[in-house]
Image (cartoon, grey):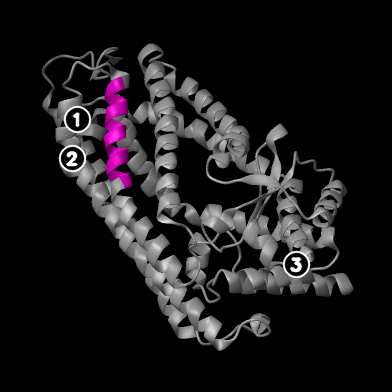
Amino acid sequence: MVLDRHLGFMRFKKPLKKTIDERTIGRILEKALFLIFLILFFGRILWRFVLQRLNLRHLLGHGKVIPPVFQDVIDEATLSKMVDYACDNARLETIEDFTDDLLELAVLFLLLPPLLSRIAGSELHLVWQALIFFGILSVIGGIIGIPFDVYHTFVLEKKYGFSTITWKLWLSDLVKSALISAVLMGILISAFMVFILYLPETWWFWAWIFFTAFEILLLWLYPVVIAPLFNKYEPIKNEELKEKITSLLAKVGLKAKGIFQVDEGRRSRHTNAYFTGIGKTKRIVLFDTLLASHSPDEILAVLAHEIGHWKKRHILKQLIFMIAASFIGFYLLYWLVHWPPLYGAFGLRQTPVYAGLLLVSVYFSCVGFFFSPVGAFISRRRERAADRTAVELVGTPEPMINALKRLAKDNLSNLHPHPWYVWFYYSHPPLTERIEYLKQLNSEKKG
């Protein structure tokens, strides 16, 4: 098996005539791969739909009951608004998911054959073919997604008083995001194609090395290069709060290169705080909406939770896992993109390697969906560990409990998610369960 260095097609050193057994085996493999794809694809659609219906029905059935831990901050009118907001989001998500599924099928079975016929049949270099191929698919996906983003931002979010963004700012964000995505995608695809052309036997290893270095570089650059293109970051103005945060960081020996507030209120009234960057670009970022709506003790508790992730090395562990998983993924990719039945399963006559990258990514996406509960379970365990660390740092769970209650109320969170939906999707424990856990920690501390 060799790879054409100019066109990126696979050629196999074998006789022109296949035996009947070879042809039969090839057809069986193609049919098996196609059947596996259908089972995974429509299984994903069905299971996602079932979970969404269960979650929605559970919410409507329990939506009039205020959980005991929230009875001091939430009234019936607010709870009703929470339920309506969660239902509207769920319905929009269902329609968007279904549209994405239809688009994926249309690309695979209607667009892909003629698109490959034109691009792969041209005299363009392999790198340019791949850039045009993925560029066209990205543009189609982006255009399809715009109506949903517009509806979510200017209809749904405004309906519930969250969205503050203007059309001018929204368009500016859209253009900047598209340009940044195009540049990053262009760099990755070009590098992968060069490795495939000039290092045909070991390209997967060098692509993995490049991908890993690229991801780490982005983590380092994001706070100082990419994020400032969208928001204004400035040192936190509340000196008293700044001193308390610095003291909190000193308890665990964590050094940040700055404590910043960001003008997120120009876009939304949602609240948040987070750590970002690595090495010398590591910084703490607080939404201006958070600073305006939460007390200093609550803000410290939220940051103590994030510090808990750093202290427990959750971010480092996640990075190591990503590197290891991508190593296995690239190795599998290397073998699968050079496997003829993969292309035959979708009725493709042209077999450029970039088409194989797309087909394998489709399989990986379907398989990865069914492993979501594993990642969600690990994430929920880490969140509980971070909560416990936050209590240890602050000395009491009360500020964290008050912060979570306020976050739930301000963001109209779903207080009644279905247990199966939580098991499959939730990266954080449900808010009610989380607050009860904090209260339990308080009881243990007193005991």
Q: Position of residue 86 (x, y in %)?
A: 46, 72
Q: How many marks?
A: 3
Q: Quadrant of residue 193?
A: top left
Tag 1's secondary structure?
Answer: helix
Task: Report the quarter where the C terminus lies.
Answer: bottom right
* Cα distance between the residues tagged 3 and 1: 58 Å
User: Relative to the observer, which residue lies in front, 348 or 24?
Assistant: 348
In the visual, does 68 lie left or right of 241? Answer: left
Instruction: Look at mark 1 in the image and give the residue it sits on.
Output: 116
In the visual, does 109 lie left or right of 368? Answer: left
Q: Quadrant of residue 119?
A: top left
Q: Position of residue 3 (x, y in %)?
A: 29, 15
Q: Amino acid at mark 3?
A: Ser
Q: Is residue 161 visible?
A: yes
* Cα distance between the residues tagged 2 and 1: 9 Å
* Cα distance between the residues tagged 3 and 2: 54 Å
Q: Residue at x 40, y 15 (%)?
A: 201
Instruction: Look at mark 2 in the image and give the residue it sits on.
Output: 111
Q: Which mark is residue 295?
A: 3
Dot in front, 3 or 1 = 3
Q: Residues within 10 Å of mark 2 (few under 14, many from 20)?
A: some
In the rendered structure, which segment of residues is drawn in magenta? Answer: 128-142
- Mark 3–mark 2 contact, CB under 8 Å? no
Upstream in the sequence, badge 2 or badge 1? 2
Q: Residue at x 82, y 48 (%)?
A: 249
Task: State the predominant SS element of the stretch in magenta.
Answer: helix
| Residue 138 in magenta stretch | yes
